[in-house]
């Protein structure tokens, strides 16, 4: 497949560890409910209908790129981490949060999952959306693909939706560690094929979201999440190599795993490590060393604090990431997704402040 030449590859250079003339910036959930143009599409279409209809997924992916043209340095394909459990045979509804009518209750329920999932067939609609969107982007910014981490997907598949306590999925880890690891690896193998398919379809960087990493003790993170994250990084690279396809940078965002950053940088095998706002960027850099780029980490709630606060906090963040003698490869982002209710013009202010303060 050939695509238009890139006019802005800042994020790809930063992801490869290069210090850039200014920090590239994008925002997790940048295509989402804070945007009136997204809500207008959403009023007419179901959430998974948008995911499954390449033209609609492309349209909402492009919305923030159009609105913030020249200010944002990457697009992320519109989809959801929960398309993987769907591909494995589970029903997932969005009403309004994610809901699994028939979650996994005991390890025997794993039998209900589809055996030998044909990932390219089940999730081919994501690939179609990626190819179309990358073409439509015309090289303006790179396109990011993604998937959920096995531990985070495991938690949704067992809890049946969001959870505050994670009681059900953690009981599995204690009572059924062997079956849990088998399921985590099974999810990882789907993620590997899914990411390879996204890269073949045109994704130029891929991110793995371990949104619930911080719910685990550091030793449980090391035992149950990290091995499946490593498996994904290694598996994607070796499958690409076997097919003669050039590797793309890989990002891991293990939200809340701030005491595991050193272990992540040492063993997980990703090029970029995402961090949330609960860790100081200079401390994160000290923990990860000089082999990876960092991504993050403004508290998303700063976007509710008014423009003076946004400017002050962006300036502080830029100083922290550009601090000291350490290598400075950095992709600016929030420390988690942007939330519905943010004024899109306040997000513009965030992007403008980034232009002002992030010059090397
Ligand atoms: O970043 C982007 O703009 C790309 C699109 C994207 C969505 N979800 C769209 C979405 C991405 C990258 C995700 C990832 C995702 N989905 C994660 C990992 C990132 C994170 O935030 O931790 C998780 C945990 C999910 C699961 C999920 N999907 C939840 C918990 C929810 C409900 C959230 C809420 O705020 O109510 C969703 C729904 C969802 N995914 C929405 C969007 C725009 C809102 C649903 C709607 O339009 O009604």
Image: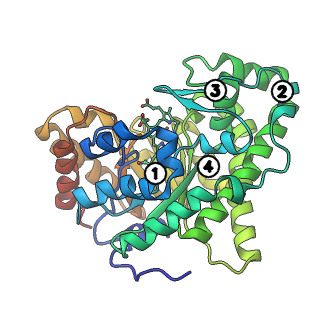
Report the side of 121 relative to 64 (left or right). Answer: right
Q: Residue at x 52, y 53 (%)?
A: 273
Question: How far is the residue under mark 1 from the one under mark 2?
Answer: 30 Å
Would you say the residues marked 2 and 4 are in contact, meaning their CB atoms lie under 8 Å apart? Answer: no
Report the side of 14 relative to 171 (left or right). Answer: left
Residue 102 to residue 267: above or below: above
Report the side of 5 relative to 178 (left or right). Answer: left
Q: Any mark on residue 78, and which? A: 1
Q: Which residue is mark 3?
A: 100
Question: How far is the residue under mark 3 from the one under mark 1?
Answer: 21 Å
Disc on the earlier residue, 2 or 4 = 2
Q: Residue at x 27, y 67 (%)?
A: 360
Q: Any mark on residue 309, and which? A: none
Residue 82 to residue 8: above or below: above
Disc on the earlier residue, 2 or 3 = 3
Q: Residue at x 77, y 26 (%)?
A: 173
Query: Is the CB atom of the residue marked by disc 1 within 8 angstroms of ligand 1's nearest atom?
Result: yes
Question: How far is the residue under mark 2 from the one under mark 4?
Answer: 31 Å
Q: Nearer the viewer, mark 2 or mark 4?
A: 2
Question: How far is the residue under mark 1 from the one under mark 4?
Answer: 27 Å
Are there few (<14), some (14-19), or many (20+) residues within 10 Å of tag 4?
A: many
| The N terminus, quarter of image | bottom right
Q: Any mark on residue 264, and which? A: 4
Q: Nearer the viewer, residue 139 or 328?
A: 139
Disc on the earlier residue, 1 or 4 = 1
Q: Which residue is mark 2?
A: 109
Query: Is the CB atom of the residue marked by disc 4 within 8 angstroms of ligand 1's nearest atom?
Result: no
Q: Nearer the viewer, residue 256 or 75?
A: 75
Disc on the earlier residue, 3 or 4 = 3
């Amino acid at each position: 497949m050939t695509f238009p030449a890139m006019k802005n590859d800042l994020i790809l250079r930063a992801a490869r560890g290069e210090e850039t003339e200014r920090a590239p910036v994008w925002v997790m959930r940048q295509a989402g409910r804070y945007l009136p143009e997204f809500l207008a599409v959403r009023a007419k279409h179901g959430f998974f209908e948008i995911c499954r209809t390449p033209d609609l997924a492309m349209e909402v992916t492009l919305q923030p790129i159009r609105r913030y043209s020249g200010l944002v340095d990457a697009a992320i394909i519109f989809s959801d981490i929960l398309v993987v459990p769907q591909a494995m045979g589970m029903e997932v509804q969005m009403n309004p949060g994610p809901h699994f009518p028939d979650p996994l209750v005991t390890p025997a329920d794993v039998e209900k999952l589809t055996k030998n999932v044909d990932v390219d067939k089940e999730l081919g609609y994501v690939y179609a959306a990626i190819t179309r969107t990358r073409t439509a982007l015309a090289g303006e910014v790179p396109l990011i693909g993604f998937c959920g981490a096995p531990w985070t997907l495991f938690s949704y598949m067992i809890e049946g939706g969001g959870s505050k306590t994670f009681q059900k999925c953690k009981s599995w880890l204690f009572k059924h560690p062997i079956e849990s690891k088998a399921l985590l690896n099974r999810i990882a193998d789907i993620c590997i094929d899914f990411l390879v398919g996204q890269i073949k379809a045109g994704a130029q960087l891929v991110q793995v979201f371990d949104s619930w990493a911080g719910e685990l003790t550091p030793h449980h993170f090391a035992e149950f999440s990290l091995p499946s994250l490593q498996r994904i990084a290694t598996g994607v690279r070796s499958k690409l190599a076997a097919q003669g396809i050039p590797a793309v940078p890989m990002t891991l965002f293990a939200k809340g795993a701030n005491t595991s950053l050193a272990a992540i940088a040492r063993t997980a095998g990703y090029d970029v490590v995402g961090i949330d706002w609960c860790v100081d960027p200079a401390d994160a850099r000290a923990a990860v060393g000089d082999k990876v780029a960092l991504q993050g980490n403004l508290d998303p709630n700063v976007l509710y604090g008014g423009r003076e606060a946004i400017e002050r906090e962006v300036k502080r963040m830029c100083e922290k990431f550009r601090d000291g003698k350490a290598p400075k490869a950095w992709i600016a982002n929030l420390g988690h997704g942007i939330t519905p209710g943010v004024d899109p013009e306040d997000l513009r202010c965030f992007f403008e402040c980034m232009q002002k303060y992030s010059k090397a």
